[in-house]
Amino acid sequence: MASILCFGDSITQGYVDLEGGWTQRLRRRLDQEATVPFGDTTFPAHAVFNLGVSGDTAEGLAARLEQELAPRQLGDQTIVVIAIGVNETAFDPRTGRPSHDPGRFAATLAGLVATARRHTERVLLVGLLPCDEARMQPPPWSEDGDEHYANDRIGQFNQAVRRVAADSGAALADCFEEALAGDHTALLHDGLHPNAAGHQLLADRVGERLQAWL
């Protein structure tokens, strides 16, 4: 039995999705694929934990990762999935100042991988989805217009995720280019958060990468 711990932000949490986002879809898929007997009934063979926190960043996750890992791990059967970064990509067009730097994000993400590796060698990083720029400059929740999103900047952070995965040997589930090559706006609920189709894409790509461990 694997314990799959999914850390991230509102997208991992499943914000605005009635079915609980990609983590719940992943759990449903695994529950359907594998069960174990227990007395006269059966139980899911794997446990999926949704540990997404709306608004979280890599630095915020770094502050809570260790304490959330410790009580939920199952030894060498633990898998840590880290899907973080979109909140760092916001920028203020009036000043030209981004809220976060891709290099600093990459260093923090590498630290997250190192923390997870103290508990398990099975670490999976999840890339970002592109946004609908027409709806994200500014997004509806930015009251004074100081928070914009753009795909060239999201792409920089996605490349940082890819570099950290390559340098650390962590597994990678990345569908940024795949989504951008198609009608990526059809994957989004509000221009940033995925809709059902977007969450299904993420669940499929994460599930594919997990198969080698399951």
Image (cartoon, rainbow, N blue to C red):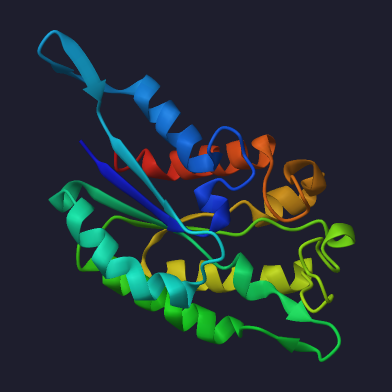
Q: Residue at x 67, y 73 (%)?
A: 89
The quadrant in which residue 38 appears is top left
Residue 149 percent location from the top left of the image = 77, 69
Q: Residue at x 40, y 76 (%)?
A: 110
Residue 209 percent location from the top left of the image = 43, 45
Q: Residue at x 62, y 39 (%)?
A: 17
Of residues 155 and 43, the one nearer the viewer is 43
User: Is 138 displayed left or right of 130 in the figure?
Assistant: right
- Furthest toward the right, the residue is 134
**Location of residue 18 with respect to 103 vertically, above or below:** above
Residue 106 percent location from the top left of the image = 50, 79
**Rendered-image quadrant of the N terminus:** top left
**Location of residue 89 with respect to 98 vertically, above or below:** above
Q: Residue at x 14, y 52 (%)?
A: 75
**Location of residue 207 with respect to 70 vertically, above or below:** above
User: Is 108 displayed left or right of 174 in the figure?
Assistant: left
**Rendered-image quadrant of the C terminus:** top left
In this view of the protein, can residue 184 be seen by the observer? yes
- Furthest toward the front, the residue is 143
- How many numbered marks appear? 0
The quadrant in which residue 86 appears is bottom right
User: Is 80 displayed left or right of 172 in the figure?
Assistant: left
Residue 135 percent location from the top left of the image = 86, 58
In this view of the protein, can residue 120 be seen by the observer? no
- Furthest toward the top, the residue is 40
